Image (cartoon, rainbow, N blue to C red):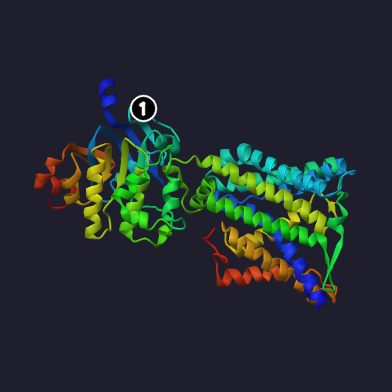
Amino acid sequence: MTGTRQRDAAVAAAGLHVSIAGSHVLQGIDLRVPEGGVTALLGRNGVGKTTTLRALLGLLPSSGTIRLLGRDVTGWPVHRIVRLGVGYVPEDRDVFAGLTVRENLRLAEIGPRPRYDLVYDLFPELKRRQRQPAGTLSGGQQQMLAIGRVLLDERPLLLVDEPTKGLAPRFVTEVIDVLQRVSAACTIVMVEQNVHVVRALARQVVVLDHGRVVHAGSSADLADEGLVRRLLGVSA
Amino acid sequence: MTTFVAITVSGLALGAVYFLIAAGLSLIYGLMGVLNFAHGAFLTLGGYAGWAVAQQLTAARGGAGFLLTAGAAALAGAAVAAATELLLIRPLYGRQIAQILVTIGLDLALVGLLLGAFGSNSRAIGVPAWVTGVTAIGGVRIPDGDFVAFGAGLAVLGALTWFLRRTRYGIIIRAGAENRDMVRALGVDVGRAFTLVFTVGGAAAGLAGLLNSVVFSGALVDPTQGDQLLIFAFIVVVIGGLGSIAGSALAAVVVGLVQVYVGFYAGGGAGLAQLGNVSVVLVLAVVLLVRPRGLLGGST
């Protein structure tokens, strides 16, 4: 990989290995995500998609090299990677149930001028429920909060794990709409099982299998039913 | 009736001291998952720091003098706690057994150092008359020290509640007790919060060490007093619910009252004052059977 290409990539991981409880989950991931738009990480259950996102953020110990937003962040502590401008929306939302909506947002402030106006404009419901404990929100509202947290500050890179998982259809539409708007100004790496959501959002797709990248290309590749069935085990 | 009232106030004062100790233990465990067995030594060091400052203030044993003594006790507890976190606990994050062993070792070492420096004889802390006096209210004679301990407990509870509810670090601590990884994933340097929690807990323990000496030990401090109190503080933390400050406050009052009621009414006459201690263990067993997560487990 040349220096120029590394600068252009929002994410460039090479030889990424992660073992969890003796299981070799990532077996040498080589991943390059260009700046801008949405790149979807796809694959069957248990192939290492979530592990890849968590390893990129430093939440899991890994070997190999990781460059995010042009900086070598290998071995950096999580908070330093986040403050570089990386946002993380976890698979199960992980909002703090005992904290109010406002406290959840306040916790996520990393810059001097948090963009509450933007977050409340995208998710008016959060403004109405500022004083409500996050644990009492519905799944869709919690997802809004989880996404809202990472939009409080300008972050050039978002790692988003299954944003539509378990959501009612109206929330799925809302989340797709927000991610679409946000992706105009940043790079999103998104794990997603729903091929229809991927088609609606993603520009590139990366398919994992057995802890390795087995396909990388345009989201138009998902029109190839044979490829989708072979790589993902589902019909296009 | 007057005896009952006096004993009740004494139980509340004892509960306040337990709360001061338990608050730090609970916060530390809630945020960091660390069982700090050196907390008892923080108490003792607070007592000795108070004694050392009071020695220098013999000419000024008024209100300001005692406040300085209490401040020194809290400062000593805070300083040793912060050093413990930075030097001993931080390199061992994620290794819970190693953390427990190192805090046990530290406790033994600190107690040994105090024994070596001051011997096993108790030292008398100089305190002003308004702390050692007695006030009669409606015919009930209540030691002023009880009011001091209870007031200190209430003040610390109020300050901690404000801190946890109103400040960014308070929010970090409450969130960290739920999901430490996610707090880090939001860009928070959790290590700073860990040091802060240890420091705040150490300050409360140091103050508790002084107040216990002044109110319940005849103004005497000795090298092992902290370890004796630590057992009851752990019981309070478990009854209240690990990580819950409100739970610790509630449990401290329950434990303090049960201990003095049983100790006086059931044990006093028969010469079995230790029954009060046994009753606390029974309360712990009942709570664990009925509510294994403690009275207010899971809330801060």
Quadrant of the drawing holding the C terminus of chain B? bottom right
Q: Residue at x 24, y 34 (%)?
A: A36
Q: Is residue A164 above or below residue B258?
A: above
Query: x, y percentage for residue B141?
Result: 85, 69
Q: Quadrant of residue A53?
A: top left
Residue B56 appears in the figure: yes
Q: Quadrant of residue B77?
A: top right
Q: Residue at x 83, y 73 (%)?
A: B268
Query: x, y percentage for residue B53?
Result: 82, 42
Query: x, y percentage for residue B162?
Result: 58, 53
Residue found at the very far bottom of the displayed protein: B1
Q: Residue at x 59, y 46 (%)?
A: B197
Callout count: 1
Dot 1 amino acid type: Arg
Q: Is residue B175 above or below residue B266?
A: above
| Left or right: A221 as drawn, with respect to A43 | left
Disc 1 designates what residue? Answer: A71
| Left or right: A227 as drawn, with respect to A49 | left
Quadrant of the drawing holding the N terminus of chain B? bottom right
Residue A90 appears in the figure: no
In this orientation, which residue lies closer to the viewer: B9 or A18?
A: B9
Q: Is residue B143 above or below residue B86?
A: below
In this orientation, which residue lies closer to the viewer: B91 or A175?
A: A175
In this orientation, which residue lies closer to the viewer: B93 or B259?
A: B259
